[in-house]
Image (cartoon, rainbow, N blue to C red):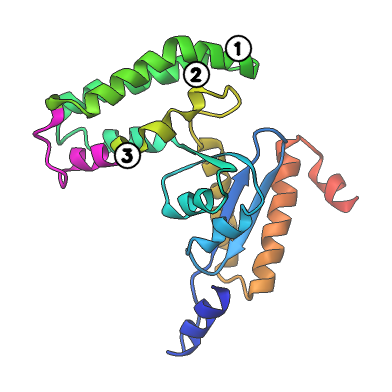
Amino acid sequence: RAREAIASAREPRRASLTARMWAYRSVTEPINVFDFTVSRHRDGPEIFLSGFEGVLLADCYAGYEAGKVGSAGKIRRAACVAHARRKVFEARSNHPAHAAMLLGLFQRLYDIEDRAKGFEAAARRSLRQSESLPIWDEIGAYVASDTVANVMPKEPFGQALTYLRPNIEALRVHLDDGAVPIDNNATEQLMKQVALGRKNWMFIGSINAGNRAADLMALISSAVRNDFDIFVYVKD
């Protein structure tokens, strides 16, 4: 894909092409990893995640689904609840009553997560099973009910429903595993590090330079996460 992207840029004599940095954050090890690509094709996460086994929590970008399909069942997809909630929040002026109902249910889920902070995975799973699961049953029943049947698909709230309905099972994955976060906000925060760097770099220079930047960002970001003395750590 990198060769294709470069060739397509050279043909019309474009001066540059858009590259992307991907962030991955382990929940079992205190490590952050960045990956550099020159396109947004699914081969970014699909190649990076080849060989990975476990739960992959992310938004509903199709490239992650491709990674799951190509894993022969070794990857289980979990969807980010914050993304689903945001879709509803952004559509609240379109159907205020429907949005208020769902936003109230999402708030209850996050209240439970606040209580579960500091819990061991087994205790968090137990709390989710007893209190969060019934709320998800309410959400699933509501988005499938006749109550919202009059919402048109192209309306903002209709688009929120279109996002929610096919992803309900993936949004519920955290109920079965106390180690899985309810959302991927912690990983999204890592992209602020990319944005800060981009203001300084503007141009990365080459594919090799992009890969080096990803390696260095993974090194520094993981050191920050572990509360290391960055200068001493990198020097060592």
Q: Which of the two marks, 2 or 3, is nearer to us in this view?
A: 3
Residue type, label 3? Pro
Circle 1 SS class: helix
C-alpha span from label 3 to label 1: 29 Å
Circle 3 SS class: helix
Mark seen at residue 15: none
Q: Which of the two marks, 3 or 1, is nearer to us in this view?
A: 3
Among the two numbered marks 2 and 3 on one chain, the one whose residue lies closer to the N terminus: 2
Q: Name, please, the residue furthest toward the front.
A: 72
Q: Position of residue 7 (x, y in %)?
A: 51, 85
Q: Which of the two marks, 2 or 1, is nearer to us in this view?
A: 1
Q: Can residue 104 be seen in this view?
A: no
Where does label 2 land, which residue?
A: 113
Contact flag, marks 2 and 1 (Cβ < 8 Å) = no
C-alpha span from label 2 to label 1: 12 Å
**Closest to the observer, 73 or 129:** 73
Where does label 3 land, which residue?
A: 166
Q: Is residue 189 above or below residue 69?
A: above
Contact flag, marks 2 and 3 (Cβ < 8 Å) = no
Question: For the point 57% across and 54% down, which residue is it?
Answer: 22
Magenta residues? 148-163
Where does label 1 land, which residue?
A: 123
Q: How crowded is mark 3: few (under 14 residues within 10 Å), some or many (20 or more)?
A: few
Quarter where residue 209 is shown: bottom right
Quarter where residue 37 is shown: bottom right
Question: For the point 55% across and 17% down, which residue is it?
Answer: 125
Q: Where is residue 78 in the image (x, y as percent from the top left)?
A: 48, 36
